[in-house]
Image (cartoon, grey):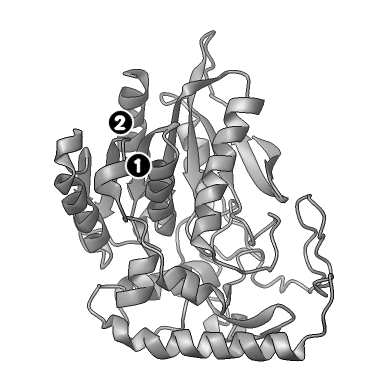
Amino acid sequence: MTSIVISRPPYQISGRLYVPEAPTTNYSPAIIIVPPSNAVKEQFPSTYARLLSRRPHNFYTVCYDPSHFGASGGNPRYLEDPNARVADISAIVDYLMREVRRVDKQRIGVVGICAGGGYAIAAAKKDWRIKAVATISLLNIGDWFRIGWEGREPVEKHMETMKTVGEERRKELRMRPSSSSSGVSGISLGPGVISLPSTPVDTRRSVTPTFDTYRRPSTPTSPGFRELYTGAEDEMGKIVPFIAPTHEKSHTDLQELTEYYTTPRAYHPRAENKLLQQSLPLILTFDAFDFVESFLKAPVFCIIGGMAGSRWHTDRLDIMLRRGSQNGIRGVDKMVVVESVGHVDFFDGFEEIDRAVGDIGGWMRAKLTSL
């Protein structure tokens, strides 16, 4: 594994490059691992990148921190901008084509996990250099925020949210003195990867898991979500929790997401569970699946848990692609439903990860080498 810095003007992205375990004399295909929202490369994106670079798959792989998060650049911090997330992917395609000599530039695929799956679909619509797309626990972040985890909530409830965010933004701009400096301590405004803010890290939670330690504890041992982060005011605006607090009636997937990101199960100090409030209009008005029936040329593989409350995102994508069959696309190329598995099991479950890596690796190899 090599730590890399990827040019993504006007800043840079922090990433990791894995080379094939058994390199050949020929050029090799490459895969970009697109992370979920609120995740950093040190969590399970690096697990998938590492395993897909090993035998028998032998891909070049890249995982990375998205713009505005982790060790990547981009101000303001904690801004979830779907268009920026999609542009990140194309910047990494540029990097692979320009900087990694042994990558076959005609055979680049993407694997998106959770919301990263939606961003991977959106990127492949725009960037036809992406030749194949695989999704794991696919989530269209716009749909999730609009109509809820299971797709049953009224979108009208967000009208007040849109109004409130606009009012908050107006107040912030009126109260903030005009300045070319962000006023955020510890963050580089230059083109490089950021230097992290000088806030103390709670070492009780600074567990950086590896694949060998990725199994969740039977009982969460950290102080929990509310102590970890409950929202605050920042120099860049109001910050809200990315993963909202859950309760016993919350969907199991949401309870597991909270446990995954905010307990030693997989907590990382740069996955801070912070979302800039001004992200909300950007997310609520974004649809990763817009125009897929017309512009998504790459074949799509989806793997999802049969018990996942998010399964409807995969079903919706399949239906939309079938509408575009006149373009030679007849739904999702391959869909695997793993029964008795939820949304988060693919994040750190040994069996689930092995299944996903095996299925995706074989499918990607077949699709990319047939070009």
Q: Which amino acid does label 1 sit on?
A: Ala
Identity of the residue drawn at 57% across and 73% down: 273
Q: Which image quadrant is residue 140 in?
A: bottom left
The percent coordinates of residue 5 (x first, y second) are: 71, 41
Is residue 114 something that shows in the picture?
yes
If you read the primary sequence from the N terminus, does the residue marked by circle 1 or circle 2 appear first?
1
Q: Give the residue at mark 1.
A: 134
Is the C terminus in the top left, top right, bottom left or bottom right quadrant?
A: top left
Is the N terminus in the top left, top right, bottom left or bottom right quadrant?
A: top right
Q: Which amino acid does label 2 sit on?
A: Trp
- Residue 116's disc number: none
> Could you classify mark 1 by the number of other residues whose Cα lies within 10 Å: few (under 14), some (14-19), or many (20 or more)?
many
What is the CA distance from the residue labelled 1 to the residue labelled 2?
Answer: 9 Å
> Could you classify mark 2 by the number of other residues whose Cα lies within 10 Å: few (under 14), some (14-19), or many (20 or more)?
some
- Residue 363's disc number: 2
Local secondary structure at mark 1: strand
**Is 367 drawn above or below residue 229 in the view shown?**
above
Residue 13 vs residue 60, the one in the foreground: 13
Local secondary structure at mark 2: helix
Residue 274 vs residue 46, the one in the foreground: 274
**Is 176 drawn above or below residue 142 in the view shown?**
below
Identity of the residue drawn at 58% across and 51% down: 41
**Is 290 drawn above or below residue 255 in the view shown?**
above
Identity of the residue drawn at 21% across and 44% down: 335
Residue 174 vs residue 251, the one in the foreground: 174
The percent coordinates of residue 47 (x first, y second) are: 50, 45
